[in-house]
Structure formats: C-alpha cells, structure tokens
Amino acid sequence: MEMLQTAEFWIGLMKIVWINIILSGDNAVVIALAARSLPENQQRQAIMFGSGAAVVLRIALTVVAAALLELSYLQIIGGILLLYIGAQLLSEDGDHEEGDVEKASLMVAIRTILIADLVMSVDNVIAIAGAAQTSGNPDHHMPLVIFGLLVSIPIIVWG
C-alpha cells in the first residue's frame, strides 16, 4: 500500500486515465457502428456485452504490451486490420430479412466489437504501457495499469 502514498503513482494514474480516455474515442464509435443495425432492444445488449468483453480484452492486452512493443511491422499489420474492419462496417446495410436469427446478428455485432477493439486497442495499450514505465517503481507498473484501466473504461462506456 506504500505505492498509494507516492506522487509518481498518482501522476502515472492520471496519465493512464487521460491517455485511455483520449485514445478510446475511436473504439466507442466502432461499438456504436456495430450495434446500429440491430433492433433497439438488442442494441443495448450488444453494447454492454461488447464493452464488457472489451474491458477484459484491454486488460489482457495490457499485460502483454511489453511483447507487443518488440514486434516488427506491428503498425502495418494493425493498419491492414483496421482497413478490413472499416470496409466491413461500411458495407453493412441496415436491411435484414424477417427470417434472420436475432441471436446470430447480436453475436455478429459483439464479435465485430471485439475484433475492432482488439485492433484499435494496440495504440492505447502501447501508450498506457509507456506511461506506466515512466512512473517510478517497476513493481508498481502492472497494478497502476490495471487500476488506471478500471477507472477509465467505465467512464468511456458511460460516455
């Protein structure tokens, strides 16, 4: 608990929260786009399940951020995946036949949210890992990152 008494911890926490809020705007847009073609009663479900799974995914990605920082051509691969997701979201039309299974479209929306969040979170994870590395004691980096994500992600989802 001594880490809570240091200025480096609180400065690092503020950095992580602000970085995550600023860089998560694009993720929120993708979540809204993925849920837009669902019936109203399923839109809220897709947003909540997709966002909840995205929180778990973001924490898991942050844990492996050090390995991601060492990969060559990561930005190119991420850019190609973003182009694919963007094309997939733009090609979807809002028209669905009566025979479509509602659960299937809900699962498609949740899957799209997860894939988009996976790809679009790479910049967030790298920035957050960098902010944590500059904040004092190396033993406090991971608790700082997880606490920062737990504070900032509900703010983003609520917004």
Image (cartoon, helix red, strand yellow):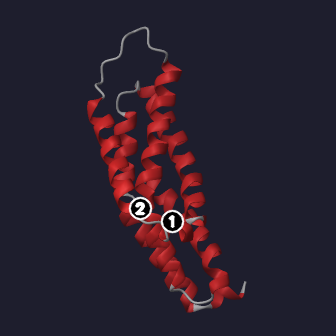
Camera-nearest residue between 17 and 130: 130
Say which amino acid is labelled 2. Answer: Leu
Tell me: residue 1, above or below residue 123. below
Name the residue: 49% across, 28% down: 106
Examine the rendering and report whether any part of residue 17 can be seen: no
Camera-nearest residue between 26 and 42: 26
CB contact under 8 Å: marks 2 and 1: yes
Q: Secondary structure at mark 2?
A: helix
Q: Please give the residue where the numbered disc 1 appears in the rendered image.
A: 68
Residue 27 in percent (x, y) is at 39, 52
Residue 23 in percent (x, y) is at 37, 63
Residue 12 in percent (x, y) is at 51, 82
Task: Name which of mark 2 and mark 1 comes first in the sequence.
Answer: 1
Say which amino acid is labelled 1. Answer: Leu
Q: Please give the residue where the numbered disc 2 appears in the rendered image.
A: 74
Residue 29 lies left or right of residue 61; in this view the side is left
Image quarter (top left, top right, bottom left or bottom right) of the N terminus: bottom right
Residue 128 lies left or right of residue 34; in this view the side is right
Task: List the single residue furthest toward the right.
Answer: 1
Task: List the single residue furthest toward the front.
Answer: 72
